[in-house]
Amino acid sequence: GHRSQRSGHRTSSSSSVSVSVLAVDPIERFKVRCAAYQQPKEIVCFSYDEERKLSMGSDDKLSYYCEPDIQSANLSSGFPDRYVMREPVPERLDALLESMRHVNSRPRDPNTPPLRPAFCTWRGIMTKVLCAPFSRDRWELGATLHDGTIYIEEHEKRKDLYGSTDKDKLMSYMGYKFEALATIPFPPAELSGPSDPRLAERDSGTVNTNVQFCSVFKTKIGVNSIVMGAEVDCLLADRKPERDPQSAYAELKTNRVITNERQQQSFERHKLLKVWAQSFLPGIPTVIVGYRHDNGRLSHIERRRTLDIPRSVRGTQPGIWDATVCINFADAFLTWLKEIVVIDDPDTVYTIEFDGRAASLLRVETGAEGPEGPFIPPWYRGQS
Ligand code: A3P
Ligand code: MG
Ligand code: MG
């Protein structure tokens, strides 16, 4: 099918193949040698406090993993009275741009050029791109070329911002509550023992989703350099390693206990794809899954090595996802974006849509307003 263009962008509409469309199918063309993924390197981090105040360069809100007490844990306890949900206001790329500005204004070797990646975006956006070949989820992006870097934000549809129904809210809450029960804000070595009162206090606090720790890292997919920002759940060590902090980060996940083959297949097909992509991108080596019952009780906890996840699902069912295809699709997507997003202007936004099967350029707009308009703020312009 061909998609009509609302902009004047030229497409070769005489055939079913358009230069402004990148389809998933035929998927075989991504089943080739995997594009190189450079080991991600953290360049800066930041923390958000309970009021959503940002501290650049701070790992204040990076908490430490500490096994929850499975017997007493209940992921629904405290809901909804001890739940502070972050206001669903679009924050766009601001914190990431602030990170870039911070990195480039830091004193550095005079022979080192400023950091100018080909791409700059949130990890969550690249997760969607990696998963696209094996997911029917739709998404829409805004892309702007500014001083040689393509910045990408997501045009979030209202209902994506937060769970809309009370049941959705409880589901989200349980994910965050697991984080609260599985972490402490100080190194576990400082605990006096298993009866340290601070362990039990984890259950009595408020779950506040304003609080976050984010890592900003640089990497390369094939030839394309990219800077991404990612929320990191916890540290699996007694302190943050100075070199390669990623090696000690861990991703926390919850999942309903699996009781039959169909649930196992769905877990492998959907959840493991997302959690692999999400953790692989920032180079987070460990995923800790808390399996819960419907009533919020924890059943058990499992650790998985991120890099072992693709092999663990291979050949388990027809049409199961393949990490090589994901990475090669992401590589092709970035290369495709570079061909399309060519006007270097902070007021020009290219809108890209993924309809579940193909990515296409929807429109090119200059100086529009609103949530899908330009997102490079004045303070980030003309300072390079
Ligand atoms: P689970 O994924 O374990 O259910 P993350 O895993 O990315 O660190 O996110 C932490 C929790 O935030 C999730 O835990 C989930 O509860 C909630 N969450 C994340 N993304 C969400 C979304 N798009 N909609 C609703 N809740 C979300
Ligand atoms: Mg998280
Ligand atoms: Mg998590």
Image: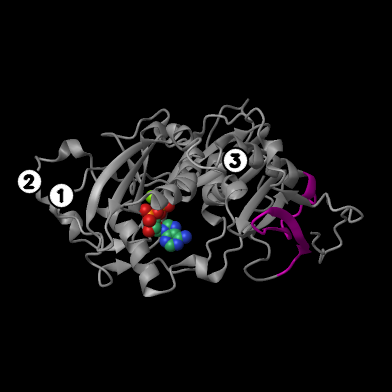
Question: What is the crowding at mark 2: few (fewer than 14 residues within 10 Å), some, or many (at least 20)?
Answer: few
For this rendering, which residue is in front, 80 or 215? 80
Judge left or right: residue 134 versus residue 205: right
Question: What is the crowding at mark 3: few (fewer than 14 residues within 10 Å), some, or many (at least 20)?
Answer: many
**Label 2 sits on residue:** 195
Q: Amino acid at mark 1?
A: Leu
- The answer to whether 307 is drawn above or below residue 131 in the figure is above
Identified at 23% across, 53% down, the residue is 298
Label 2 close to label 1 by CB (< 8 Å)? yes
Q: Which residues, given as a range, are shown in magenta?
A: 339-368
Indicate the quadrant containing the C terminus: top left, top right, bottom left or bottom right. top right
- Which label belongs to residue 199? 1
- Which label belongs to residue 326? 3
Question: What is the crowding at mark 1: few (fewer than 14 residues within 10 Å), some, or many (at least 20)?
Answer: many
**x and y percent of residue 375 in the render?**
64, 60
Single out the mark in the foreground, 1 or 3.
3
Within the magenta stretch, is there residue 367?
A: yes
Judge left or right: residue 279 versus residue 180: right
